[in-house]
Amino acid sequence: MQVICAVSDFTAENGATLVIPGSHLWDDERKPDPSEAIATVMKAGSALIFLGSTFHAGGANSTQAEHRATPGMAFDASNVRQEENMYLSLTSAQVASYPEQIQRLLGWSAGGNHMGWVEVDGQMIDPIHLLGDLDCAAIEGVGARRHLAPALDCGR
């Protein structure tokens, strides 16, 4: 579920969020047409609530000095992966430079329900192990050691 709160008035002219009602019901073959989009005109203090699978976009601001301000929030079941795979847009070296909490928030973690794991030579592991120092005892299997830490001496 997505929530967009209007901090300022939303008008078609200042770039109100565009939505295509009913698009959350479409199959994967159906493509959106810009003519189907509706501007969400609303007063400051209003909120737009919709399923994240609904086609939506920011509108174009055709004004010179008027801006729309909005925080957006996404509410997702904690047992599913994020919709956008941020971990694919950053190098592992970049992510490794961040604190572990940030690494996990970026998707480099597996949940207690085993969602988000990565398979290396048939073994499920938490992807956080791909980023830093590895505990050889925690990662079994010759292939896993070979792929995850070629410079690490795990008794080879």
Image (cartoon, rainbow, N blue to C red):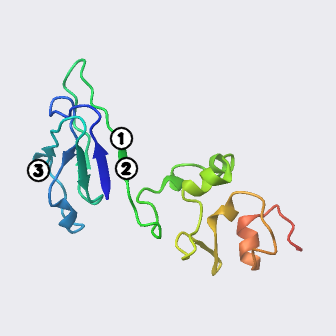
Q: In the shown orientation, is residue 44 left or right of residue 12?
A: right
Instruction: Estimate how packed mark 3 is, as few (under 14), some (14 to 19) or many (20 or more) residues with alpha carbons within 10 Å.
Output: few
**Local secondary structure at mark 1:** loop
Q: Residue at x 81, y 75 (%)?
A: 137
- Residue that sits furthest to the left in the current view: 35
Q: Earlier in the sequence, mark 1 or mark 3?
A: 3
- Residue that sits furthest to the front in the current view: 45
**Local secondary structure at mark 3:** helix
x, y percentage for residue 2?
A: 31, 54
| Between 93 and 79, the one nearer to me in the picture | 79
**Local secondary structure at mark 2:** strand
Q: Residue at x 22, y 63 (%)?
A: 24
| Between 142 and 3, the one nearer to me in the picture | 3
The disc label shown at residue 71, or none: 1
The disc label shown at residue 52, or none: none
x, y percentage for residue 123?
A: 65, 79
- From the image, tell me which residue sits under label 2: 73
Q: Is residue 133 above or below residue 34?
A: below
- From the image, tell me which residue sits under label 3: 36
Callout in the foreground (2, 3):
2
Q: Amino acid at mark 1?
A: Pro
Cα gap from disc 1 to disc 3, whole angstroms:
24 Å
Q: Are marks 1 and 2 in contact (CB under 8 Å)?
A: yes
Q: Tell me where residue 68 sits by quadrant.
A: top left
Looking at the rendering, in which quadrant would you find the N terminus? bottom left
Instruction: Estimate how packed mark 1 is, as few (under 14), some (14 to 19) or many (20 or more) residues with alpha carbons within 10 Å.
Output: few
Q: Earlier in the sequence, mark 2 or mark 3?
A: 3
Q: Amino acid at mark 3?
A: Glu
Cα gap from disc 1 to disc 2, whole angstroms:
7 Å
